[in-house]
Image (spheres, rainbow, N blue to C red):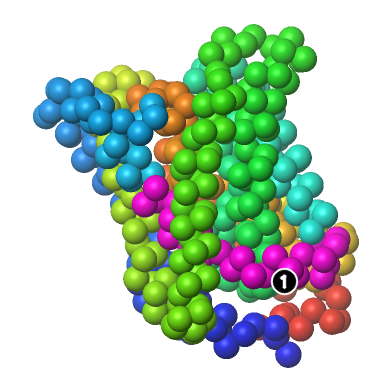
Amino acid sequence: MSKRSDVGMRPVSEMVAGAPVADPEAPVLARLSWLDRFLPVWIIAAMVIGLGLGRAIPGLADALDTVQVGSVSLPIAVGLLLMMYPVLAKVRYRQLDRVTGDRRLLASSLLLNWVVGPALMFTLAWLLLPDLPDYRTGLIIVGLARCIAMVLIWNDLSCGDREAAAVLVAINSVFQILAFGLLGWFYVSVLPGWLDLDQTDAHFSVTTIVVSVLVFLGIPLVAGFLTRTIGERRKGQDWYENRFLPRIGPIALYGLLFTIVVLFALQGHTITSQPWDVVRIAAPLLVYFFVMFGGSFALGHRLGLGYAKTSTLAFTAAGNNFELAIAVAIGVFGVTSGQALAGVVGPLIEVPVLVALVYLALALRRRLPWPASDTRMAA
């Protein structure tokens, strides 16, 4: 019998926004909510609007900087916080006590997410963007931001283990608070020096990145934890999961789109004069997605985790938290920085690539041998 709870039977995409098709045998795109299904369209539209505003309002940058939160203008800070809060309100923090249930899965996930993933993105960024230090640093920051939101959707669509995904997401949420600043300092300032690489982007403060993480991840993390704790205590888990979360889910998208509009309004000239840079930023991201997914899936299969947990392991390792990466890049380097632009390119290509990986995972479920105890093979 499947381990899915009654609350968990509802597709995760429904808890994010919109009303997806309930039939689990429906095509993958049909099971995405309409907001998620057209995410690349919304992002492109936000980019176009931002470019238009940048041309129409020459003094926009000065207006936004009138009131600041640290080094970030207040409107942008609000957008970043709104972008992060619904994501962290969905995390099932009480699932953390299940981390010792499968030590192979836990150890593999920690290794892939916090050692292999950042190291791979660092390598790809230096190999493919040796002459673009700002974009390179932005991608390194993306590699440190582990996925804690959309991964739940990809996991659900691929028939992964929903409870295991909830645990891994909770772990990554907490671990990012503890490790993001230190790893950022190591990969941006320390490791390039050890490898005798050109540190043209060394104007970097570890204190600034720690403060940015504490503000743009710490505040919504505490708010999300309190929201779930109080909401479930007063109304119950069913109400929280199936009624409250669908209402606040779209706020994350609105915050992301608002941030993209502002970023492209301020970077319009740079973007329109150097469109090839966007293509070059996308190249290492595409390689990263496929290498991380393929390697993680192969590892899970080799360890005999079963299809459900293997799929969960692969998607948690392949995805990235672009919202956090954008927030940190803006907080540390500024909204007009190349680092911030590198973070924005990510969600533009994430949806079509990971939808393709969902199809790949489902094909591998049918074609590869799996343990007889993997009951979700019949799902």
Residue at x 49%, y 84% (from the top left corner): 236
What is the magenta segment's predominant secondary structure? helix
On whether residue 307 falls in the magenta region, the answer is no
- Residue 157: x and y, percent? 56, 70
Whether residue 134 is situated above or below residue 297 in the rendered picture? above
Residue at x 24%, y 36% (from the top left corner): 50
Which residue, as the protein is rendered here, is positioned at the far left? 56
Residue at x 70%, y 47% (from the top left corner): 113
- Residue 378: x and y, percent? 70, 85
The quarter of the rendered structure image containing the N terminus is: bottom right
- Residues shaded magenta: 81-105
- Residue 204: x and y, percent? 55, 18
Whether residue 8 is situated above or below residue 224 in the rendered picture? below
Q: Nearer the viewer, residue 284 or 163?
A: 163
Residue 35 position by quadrant: bottom left
Name the residue type under label 1.
Ala
Question: Within 10 Å of the Cα at label 1, are there few (<14), some (14-19), or many (20+) other Cα atoms?
Answer: many
